[in-house]
Amino acid sequence: MTTDLAWIDKALIAARPQAVAALLRYFRDLELAEEAFQEACLKALAAWPRNGPPRDPAAWLIFVGRNAALDAKRRDRRLAALPDEDAISDLDDVEGDLVERLDQADYRDDILRLLFVCCHPDLPSTQQIALALRVVSGLAVRQIARAFLVSESAMEQRITRAKARVAKAGTPFETPSAIERAERLTTVSAMIYLVFNEGYSAGEATNEARSALCAEAIRLGRLLMKLFPAEPELMGLSALMLLQHSRAAARFDAQGGVVLLEEQDRALWDRRMIAEGLALIDKAMRRRAPGPYQIQSAIAALHAQAASASDTDWRGIDQLYATLERMQPSPVVTLNRAVAAAKLDGPEAGLALIEPLAEKLSGYFYYFGVRGVFLKQANRFAEARVAFDRAIALANSPAEAAHIRMHLDQLTSETAPQ
């Protein structure tokens, strides 16, 4: 027997993706699948402390949730008008067929389908993330609203609209082919990384509601790796998130100000996360099928392996960014490569790389922050001041604005008449 409610809570969270995914395929209705799972959870909270945990919590929840939803459907049918005679006289064992479909489910494709439904292309990225956090992760609406800094009612409406769009889109439920599975994995991976970045870009170290999203994205990444253990890009994605999140305790000072990577106290980095990330990169690279996430995680690894900022392998980072540019051209990738170029060959080399990006990144905070630093290092102080002013105007958080203000104050101090 077990009365450990903490264990039950963890078991319900762990089983949620598999159970909701199977119920979704069974009923082909996202709202009904969620309701069936919630009903099963209530029954679990009543039965498991008394009878002990089942051998397979997910299978128990699927079975109980399915029966609860079928009972509800039967009750609804008793209140509805009778269908045509030919439908009533159908002697096929319809329910038996449905049970067989459920019992023979390929859970891997079920969960992939559930994640794919959440990142449907008809949904904007904010709705994709919110829907995944609600349906797959089971976070309460109030938790998601707090993470996105919106009211609970606004988030409820956002999730409701997303579910309505999914229902209207009529997403197919057939088992995906190998090609479709690969396409879905790419889309789902991008959505999980969006979840991670929502937390990683939190403006304060104390904003636990948003930083917790990083941990949830890592959990989802591990779930995908468990389902698809031979996919090197999933290893790369998980490694990237682990290595970035390993620096969480060092990214902000006591006042909530941003601490740049090269100025961080590396003793605060989480070495267990780093070790796990490095092991995943090594495993992925042995597959000899490089992809964007693997390249990005390799860049993060070079930072993680440097004992100090001065030990950073900027040549290796520059080469990796050059590879990423060829693999996945992007002005943001070039902007990041420019930082490595400036470390190797001076600020003018960095400026030469980012000048062509001015139009494409005209509304991007980091472009003007980096440009301002390069101009300051090149003693082009008037131009640096203009770039920093623009960066402050585009800052995404008070912490970012304060960091640029610090650069401006240093610039004023250094150029003041003696």
Image (cartoon, rainbow, N blue to C red):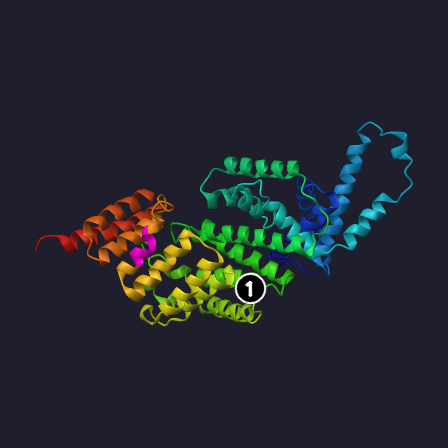
Q: Quadrant of the C terminus?
A: bottom left
List the single residue furthest toward the top. 81
From the image, tell me which residue sits under label 1. 235
Disc 1 residue type (three-letter):
Met
Residue 50 vs residue 261, the one in the foreground = 261
Relative image position of residue 414 (x, y in whole percent):
16, 56
Q: Is residue 391 magenta?
A: no
Residue 398 vs residue 112, the one in the foreground = 112
Q: Which residues are magenta?
A: 350-355
Q: Quadrant of the N terminus?
A: bottom right
Residue 238 vs residue 205, the one in the foreground = 238
Question: Is 157 displayed left or right of 307 in the figure?
Answer: right
Q: Quadrant of residue 393?
A: top left
Relative image position of residue 369 (x, y in whole percent):
31, 51
Q: Quadrant of residue 160?
A: top right
Residue 269 in sight from this viewpoint = no
Q: Is residue 353 magenta?
A: yes
